Amino acid sequence: MRSLRLLSVLLLLSCGGDDGPAAIRFPEPGPVGGEAGRGSFTFGAATAAAQIEDDNDATDWYAYTSPTDMGGLGNGVFVGDAVRGFSRQVEDNTLVAEMNLDSYRFNPSWARIEPTRDAIDTDAVAHYGRVLDDLVARGIKPMMTVHHFSSPVWVDDPRRV
């Protein structure tokens, strides 16, 4: 018991002082935009097709979240139209450019490119090609994630689990 009292007194004494904590000193901030301040740093935006693209009933996530009266499982928040990131992609690229961002990470929807086994949708492939061309023309570095989150329903149909 005596050692506990001694320890308590020592702890209280070590916390004493009226000066407060030492000041934290940060260097002056430099410019974020422009090559002078950025160096190799990339400042951009990122999206995921399953979360932003318009209705895509060929995805496992669409089947998982769509209401039961639409043939889905009715779990979670229905993706539906989302923010129409597929049909409005070029407009979204404009927003990225207006924010002076220099990169954009996104993923093409595998379910759009290959909605059924061995059937490639050439219009979807051409769309993503136009997105890449538009980003490059605006000076925005595209970073493509090959696969993120959702799969074509023919690969993984949650209704068959």
Image (cartoon, helix red, strand yellow):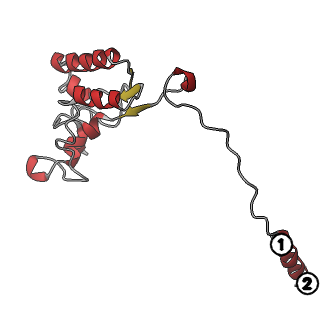
Residue occupying the point 17% across, 16% down:
122
Q: Residues within 10 Å of mark 2 (few under 14, many from 20)?
A: few
- Closest to the observer, 33 or 130: 33
For marks 1 and 2 on the same chain, the one whose residue lies earlier in the sequence: 2
Judged from this view, the residue extending furthest toward the left is 69
Q: Distance between the Cα atoms at labels 1 and 2?
A: 14 Å
Q: Quadrant of residue 159?
A: top left
**CB under 8 Å between callouts 1 and 2?**
no
Instruction: Look at mark 1 in the image and give the residue it sits on.
Output: 11
Q: Which residue is mark 2?
A: 2
Amino acid carrying label 2: it is Arg
Q: Nearer the viewer, residue 94 or 59?
A: 94
Which residue does the image show at 24% across and 43% down from the upper left? Answer: 158
- Any part of residue 48 in sight: yes
Quadrant into which the N terminus falls: bottom right
Residue, far bottom: 1
Left-right relation of 95 to 11 = left
Q: Secondary structure at mark 1?
A: helix
At which x and y percent is residue 157? 23, 39
Residue 149: give its label: none
Q: Position of residue 79 (x, y in %)?
A: 21, 45
Observer-nearest of 101 and 81: 101
Using residue 129 as the reference point, say whether residue 44 is left or right of it: right
Amino acid type of the residue tagged 1 in the rendering = Leu
